[in-house]
Amino acid sequence: MNARDEQGVSRREFVAGSVSGVVLAAAPLAAWAGRAGDADKAAVLAQIPGMHAANVKRLQDWIALPSIAAEGRNYPQGPEYMARLARDAGFTGVKLVPTAGKPGVFGRLDAGARTTVGVYFMYDVKQFAPEEWSSPPLEARLVHRDGLGTVCVGRGAVNQKGPENAFLSALLAFRAAGRKLPVNLVLVCEGEEEIGSPHFGEVVLNDEVAAALRHCVGVFMPEAGQDRDGGVQVSLGAKGVVELELVASGERWGRGPRHDVHSSLEAMVDSPSWHLVQALNTLVEKDGHTPAVEGFFEKARPLTDAQKAMIAHYASQTSEQVRKQLLGVDHWVRDSGWLEALQLLESQPTINIEGLVGGYTGPGGKTVLPHRAVAKIDMRLVPDMTAADTLAKLKAHLAKHGFGDIEVNMSGGYDPTQTELSSRLIQTQLATYRKLGVEPLLWPRGAGSWPGYLFTGAPLNLPAGHFGLGHGSGAHAPDEYYLIESSNPKIQGLDGAVASFVEYLYALA
């Protein structure tokens, strides 16, 4: 790793001084707190530079042990490793919480403080195909990225092990400084987020876990919240999701073959593959985009005037062209303008085909008429839609249109989540970002999903959100990365991300 950036500023000086977007060449991390006269905070922040190598190594070691729920990979090793990380960071009473699926992990850190905060972790990661990566996905190599600096490349690097490791590193900085945390913590982890959290409710509503969470002012998920321009969003919620398979088969349909046959027989035998394609075609309008399932929009809550104003402000402050380049697209749906596209992103529930699988897909041809075809589907939901109601509507739609034989197998999912702007959790996030020199953009809800509804809904009814400086990208994709050493004065590397969590904990207190 290069210890100096292109401007000749050392890493420790750079990380400390770049929060406002301006390099302050002589500002140590402790200066973030020292200016406020907080000796305890300054002592904690002063530990971070010296812990850098150990913090990087912890992330690399964690990436090397992927827990992949869809494959049943590294269970129970994954949750046991998560429990060990929690104990090392100071959590006590750490235990695995059994579920009908993969176990959760629960622990508490009692600092004798007046305020208690919940922290949500996921220890699982998405699947990967090594041949698609430029750097092996489990080696967590440190590589240079133009315009960014040194990044750690690996599956789970930003989703979510990088930000979570940065938060654990902040807790370790408190221990190294011999200082108590200013808040108590309740840690709740799951190992099935990447398959739609089908059993996380069993963790959250466990009697001991729920009792601890009831004392919390809110729950937050660590994130690497900065984009490549250094900006951050504060989202007030997230869309819900339903993940499922649609399976067409000759056996269930009663037409077509019960096993693969020669493709010449297409002349006299029905095709389950075409049956599935025809069913899929009924799910959207002729534009190939708008959901056509009967009643799909009836519970979708429209954007409020305040939410529309948030989106308009965001559109005025961000580059449409940069977003298009990042996504590799030239047009928004229906050739919408930037503002309209963002409003659609926030307001519209969706039906998406994740993948289609059927028959032979290897090299060359195999002239086969498959007996079975599968579509992987996800549906994103906005308030006040629910996963159960949306799934029921999809099944009813298929039956009405003559496709009741198609299997609908939901693998995971949950309802949308929403938190009030006025909540203490969100207001503290906004204040902390501004203190660190970053003006956050408010966002009505994330277009992605996480199971925050278990915290924001009954019986807990807690505010929930995300927080953290730092940067990463490529979640669910090849070459996923998390920024370690930043050469961009607008973006924090690992040390700055760790320091942002220290600041946030003091602000919550």
Image (cartoon, rainbow, N blue to C red):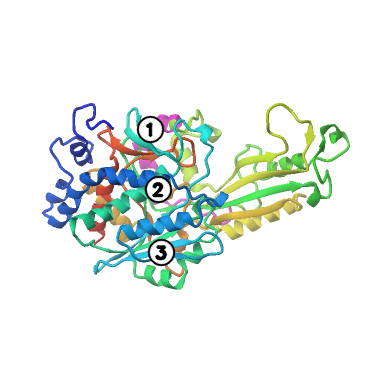
Q: Quadrant of the C terminus?
A: bottom left
Q: Amino acid at mark 1?
A: Ser
Nearest to the observer: residue 89 or residue 265? 89
Q: Quadrant of the N terminus?
A: top left
Q: Is residue 41 located in the magenta-colored stretch of the structure?
A: no
Q: Which residue is mark 1?
A: 319
State the predominant SS element of the stretch in magenta.
helix
Could you classify mark 3 by the number of other residues whose Cα lies within 10 Å: few (under 14), some (14-19), or many (20 or more)?
many
Q: Amino acid at mark 3?
A: Phe
Q: As displayed, is residue 96 above or below residue 311? A: below
Residue 309 appearing in the image: no
Could you classify mark 2 by the number of other residues whose Cα lies within 10 Å: few (under 14), some (14-19), or many (20 or more)?
many
Q: Residue at x 15, y 43 (%)?
A: 28
Q: Which mark is residue 230?
A: none
Residue 44 drawn at (x, y percent): 19, 53
Q: Is residue 300 located in the magenta-colored stretch of the structure?
A: yes
Q: Residue at x 32, y 35 (%)?
A: 229
Q: Which mark is residue 106?
A: 3
Which image quadrant is residue 19 in?
top left
The residue range painted magenta reads 297-325
Which image quadrant is residue 260 in?
top right
Mark 2 or mark 1: whose residue is earlier in sequence? 2
Mark 3 or mark 1: whose residue is earlier in sequence? 3
Q: Are marks 3 and 1 in contact (CB under 8 Å)?
A: no
Report the side of 354 relative to 469 (left or right). right
Q: CA distance from mark 2 to mark 1?
A: 35 Å
Q: CA distance from mark 3 to mark 1?
A: 41 Å
Q: Which residue is mark 2?
A: 62
